[in-house]
C-alpha cells in the first residue's frame, strides 16, 4: 500500500530523513514509533503529499503522492493538531468533506452520531476542547471511507472511554473494509493492542520493520535465581541487559524465547521464568538504551 524507497529530506543542512525505506502492506495496522526528533512527522508529511522529498520515492498503490489529487482522494489524515475552518461547525465540515471525498457516506455519518454524543454538531469546532476536536476528526475521517487512514498521535487528549471507543470503531472499519492504517504514537502500550506491524525509527531511518509477533519473538526477558553466583551464559547467547536484585537476575537476551529458555536451563537455575516483553521494552533495546532509563521499564 505504502512504498517508501531511499527517501532523503534536508532542512537548512539538517538531514531529517536519511535514505529511509518503509513498506506498509495493504490491510495492515502499522505502528510507527521512535524518539522525539526521529523524523516520524516528517515522513508522514511526505506520505500525505505535503512535503516533496529531495531524493527517493514515496508511493501509495504504486503512484507518486506529491501533487497527485487522485491518490490523495484515497486517504484521510488526522494530524496531531487538527485544522478546521474558522467559523465551521461539524455539519459545515461534513459538507466540505462530502465535496472532496466522492465516497463520503452521509448515512454512516448519521449512524456514528451515537458514538460521539458529547459533540454539539452546531457549535463552532474551534470552540471545542482538543479532545472533542479529535472526536470530530475521527468521525469525519471514517465517513470518507478511505483506503488508507494516516494518524499522528490520534488519541492524544481523549479520555480513556473515548480512546477505547475510537479504537473499536477503527478496528471494525479495518475488519469490514480492509482499510490500511498508519499510526504514529508515543503510547506504545496502546499500539501493542492494535498494531500487527511495527516500524522503529531513529535519526531519519527505519531501524527495524517487522510484524509485532516477529518483533516480540526476537528479544527475550528472563528471570533466574541460582544457588551461588550466576554462571557464565552459554556460548551464542547475546546479553543485552542484566539487572540483579538479591539472588534474582533479570536478563534481556537476543533471540526467541524457547531458545533462550533452553540455554538458561543448561545453567541449572533454582528458578527460571521467561517473560514476554512489551513493545515499550523492545523499542528501548532495539535503540540500544541510548538516552533512556532502561531500569524504569524493567521493574
Image: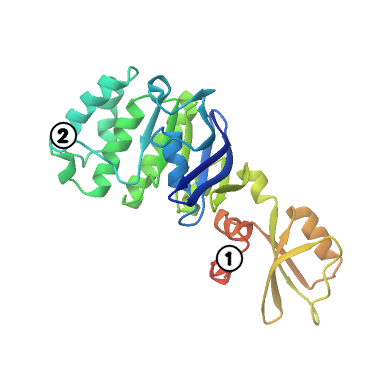
The earlier-in-sequence mark between 2 and 1 is 2
Name the front one of labels 2 and 1: 1
Q: Which residue is mark 2?
A: 88
Q: Secondary structure at mark 2?
A: loop
Q: Is residue 289 above or below residue 179?
A: below
Q: Secondary structure at mark 1?
A: loop
- Left or right: 288 with respect to 158? right
> Which of the 4 quarters of the picture holds residue 139?
top left
- Left or right: 206 with respect to 132? right
Residue 237 point in image, percent of width and height: 80, 61
Residue 62 point in image, percent of width and height: 54, 23
Q: Quadrant of the N terminus?
A: top right
Q: Is residue 187 above or below residue 149?
A: below
Residue at horizontal 63 percent and vertical 62 percent from the top: 288
How many marks the image carries: the answer is 2
- Circle 1 crowding by C-alpha within 10 Å: few under 14, some 14–19, many from 20: few
Amino acid at each position: 500500500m505504502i512504498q517508501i524507497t531511499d527517501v532523503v529530506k534536508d532542512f537548512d543542512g539538517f538531514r531529517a530523513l536519511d535514505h529511509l525505506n518503509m513498506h506498509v502492506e495493504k490491510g495492515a495496522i502499522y505502528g510507527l514509533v521512535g524518539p522525539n526528533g526521529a523524523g516520524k512527522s516528517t515522513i508522514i508529511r511526505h506520505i500525505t503529499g505535503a512535503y516533496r522529498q529531495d531524493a527517493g520515492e514515496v508511493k501509495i498503490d504504486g503512484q507518486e503522492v506529491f501533487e497527485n489529487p487522485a491518490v490523495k482522494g484515497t486517504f484521510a489524515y488526522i494530524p496531531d493538531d487538527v485544522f478546521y475552518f474558522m467559523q465551521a461547525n461539524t455539519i459545515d465540515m461534513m459538507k466540505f468533506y462530502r465535496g472532496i471525498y466522492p465516497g463520503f457516506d452521509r448515512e454512516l455519518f448519521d449512524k456514528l452520531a451515537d458514538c460521539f454524543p458529547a459533540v454539539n454538531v452546531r457549535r463552532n469546532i474551534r470552540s471545542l476542547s482538543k479532545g472533542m476536536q479529535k472526536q470530530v476528526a475521527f468521525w469525519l475521517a471514517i465517513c470518507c471511507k478511505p483506503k488508507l487512514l494516516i494518524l499522528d498521535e490520534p488519541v492524544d487528549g481523549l479520555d480513556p472511554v473515548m480512546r477505547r471507543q475510537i479504537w473499536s470503531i477503527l478496528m471494525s472499519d479495518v475488519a469490514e473494509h480492509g482499510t490500511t492504517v498508519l499510526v504514529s504514537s508515543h503510547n506504545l502500550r496502546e499500539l501493542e493492542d492494535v498494531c500487527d506491524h511495527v516500524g522503529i525509527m531513529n535519526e531519519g531511518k527505519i531501524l527495524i520493520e517487522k510484524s509485532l509477533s516477529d518483533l516480540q519473538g526476537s528479544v527475550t526477558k528472563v528471570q533466574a535465581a541460582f544457588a551461588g553466583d550466576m554462571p557464565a551464559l552459554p556460548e551464542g547467547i547475546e546479553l543485552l541487559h542484566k539487572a540483579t536484585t538479591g539472588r534474582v537476575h533479570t536478563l534481556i537476551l537476543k533471540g526467541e524465547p524457547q531458545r533462550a529458555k533452553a540455554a538458561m536451563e543448561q545453567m541449572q537455575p533454582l528458578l527460571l521464568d521467561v517473560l514476554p516483553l512489551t513493545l515499550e521494552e523492545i523499542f528501548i533495546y532495539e535503540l540500544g538504551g541510548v538516552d533512556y532509563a532502561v531500569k524504569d521499564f524493567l521493574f
